[in-house]
Image (cartoon, helix red, strand yellow):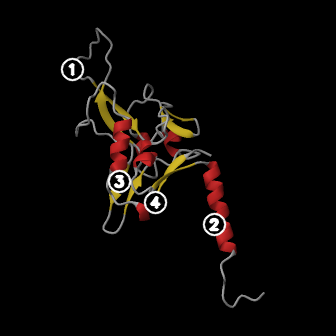
Amino acid sequence: MNRFVIAEPQNCIGCRTCEVACAMAHKPADIPMLTPENFRPRLKVIKGARVSTAVLCRHCDDAPCANACPAGAIVVRDNSVQVLQERCVGCKTCMVACPYGAIEVVTVPADMPSGSVLKTRNLKAQAIKCDLCIDRAGGPACVEACPTKGLHLVDAAVLEATLKARREQAALVDIPNLPL
């Protein structure tokens, strides 16, 4: 089972601290500060009239985005679904395939080889999505930053403990008029 971050809408206050933490965790080192042009969190906080919550990649075991990617740019690595940017062609197929709307295709400056003929367009489209801050020692920045603890990293052990607790709770429910 792949790991993923789950949001608890009942705890979300819509502050977007998770978005800022995510954007900071993925900010290129050569960019000194976040601006509207380079603010690219890999999750989105959705606000409704009665609820707000973070929407992020669920790192599906049989990921539709990976199955749809014609370039083989989306792979499973370290119990998570990752985008290999060197392979991504920015075709947006993964974005269409994702049932959660958790993938975005953005335009970033391209690394052009010296002497390149293409000097007019130095841009590259690439898919971005939650990568569980795979290279960050503290784990997902959004989980750490959430002031209400409304985001949780779920792995096989956490999921099994949750299922066990729910089964026990269901077994203890008193059902009236049930013949014994």
- Contact between marks 2 and 4 (CB within 8 A): the answer is no
| Residue, far top | 115
Look at mark 2 in the image and give the residue it sits on: 166
Identify the residue at horizontal 34%, vertical 39% (top origin). Answer: 23
Above or below, 13 against 20 in this view is below
- Contact between marks 4 and 3 (CB within 8 A): the answer is no
- Give the number of the mark in front: 4 or 3: 4
Mark 2 or mark 4: name the one nearer the start of the chain.
Answer: 4
- Choose between 66 and 48: the one closer to the eye: 48
Q: Where does residue 171 sit, x and y in percent of width and height? A: 70, 74
The residues bearing labels 3 and 2 have C-alpha atoms spaced at a distance of: 28 Å
Identify the residue at horizontal 61%, vertical 53% (top origin). Answer: 158
Look at mark 3 in the image and give the residue it sits on: 45
**For the residue carrying disc 3, how many other residues have a C-alpha within 10 Å: few (<14), some (14-19), or many (20+)?**
many
**For the residue carrying disc 4, how many other residues have a C-alpha within 10 Å: few (<14), some (14-19), or many (20+)?**
some
Identify the residue at horizontal 48%, vertical 38% (top origin). Answer: 138
**What amino acid is at disc 2?**
Arg
What label does residue 120 carry, if any?
Answer: 1
